[in-house]
Amino acid sequence: MSAAPHLTETYRPVPLLQDKVIVVSGIGPGLGHSLTIEAARMGADLVLVSRTESRLEKLAAEVRALGRNALVAPTDITDEEQRQALVERAVGEFGRVDCLINNAFAIPPMNPITEIELEALRVANETNVFAPLRLSTLFADALERTRGSIIMLNSCVSYSSQPEFSGYKLSKGALAHLASSLATELGPRGIRVNSVAPSYVYEDINKAYFDWLASQAGTTHEEIYRQKAEPTDLRRLAGPEEVARATLFLASDLASAVTGQMLTVDCGEFHR
């Protein structure tokens, strides 16, 4: 099963991000990896941010194999001292930053919101809301010098009312309002702020989730995929590379007049 093999086979990257420096938080096996690789293929140098140094080193080697530079920056983005150190390292290494992509996320317990402990919600919001706020604030001076941009990875969960997603929806709703406020506040400094909202991205985390759903329902992974894809206009789910490419458009000069927007990347599940 594949998101769109014909698109993958025919896609050819162009240098939309040539020599730009992009900071990506939340590097993992799915979207974080794809954001990094697709940005490098478009000509960018990368600052790679997560807690796990070994994962960052492996990804940095992939970036360098594409002829681009990569700074490995192990960081707990919920820690203020480490956030400040990240900004200093990024600017010190490259002398500039053109885009900050706030991709890191935490998922609170998947229970109705009245049943979730407040502490669990606080912990999730430290990663999902407060860390993007602080990183955006701390990188603002560097982004002003390049007339750069900030991109928040949001979610189509904001358009859903399923009880099990309510805690996550709380975070993502707050993140959407944060992005809107930052777009207004930082706009006079030449900094654009936008959001991207994928629905189910067909990558490792959701593949494992579909396996779990299938086991609970006594059905197959393929049937769960069909159920999730059926509400979309394209009758399929977006792959991480597709979400990454749409996201990186907002980091490019093609989007120089785009700010305060939420780009939905969901194969036509929601019309906004």
Image: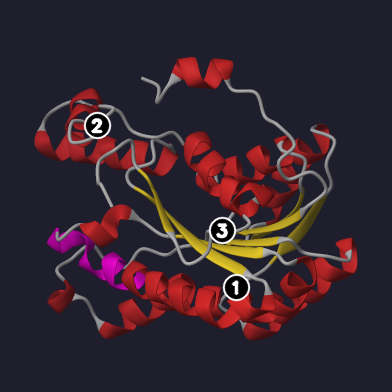
Q: In which quarter of the image is residue 170?
A: bottom left
**Residue 197 part of the magenta segment:** no
Q: In which quarter of the image is the N terminus?
A: top left
Q: What element carries label 3?
A: loop
In the image, what residue occupies the spot 44% across and 33% down? Answer: 239
Which dot marks residue 26?
3
Classified by dominant secondary structure, the portion drawn in magenta counts as: helix
Label 1: which secondary element: loop
Q: Sort mark 1 into few (<14), some (14-19) or many (20+) by Cα contacts within 10 Å.
A: many
Image disc number at residue 60: none
Disc nearer the start of the sequence (2/1): 1
Q: Residue at x 27, y 37 (%)?
A: 210
Magenta span includes 165: yes
Q: Measuring from the top left, give residue 223's x and y in whole percent.
A: 18, 26
Residue in front for this viewpoint, 54 or 197: 197
Residue at 20 percent of width and 27 percent of height:
226
Res 110 quadrant in image: bottom left
Label of residue 233 in the image: 2
Front disc: 3 or 2: 2
**Distance CA(mark 2)–CA(mark 1):** 37 Å
Amino acid of disc 1: Ile
Q: Assess disc 3: are there few (<14), some (14-19) or many (≥20) residues with their C-alpha within 10 Å of its C-alpha.
A: many
The boundaries of the magenta stretch are 162-171
Q: Is residue 262 above or below residue 68?
A: below
Is 95 left, or right, of 110 in this rendering?
Answer: right
Task: Report, in whole angstroms, how far the alpha carbon at label 3 lies from the one at label 2.
Answer: 29 Å
The crowding category of the residue bearing disc 2, from other C-alpha atoms within 10 Å (few below 14, some 14 to 19, many at least 20), is: some
- The disc at residue 77 is 1
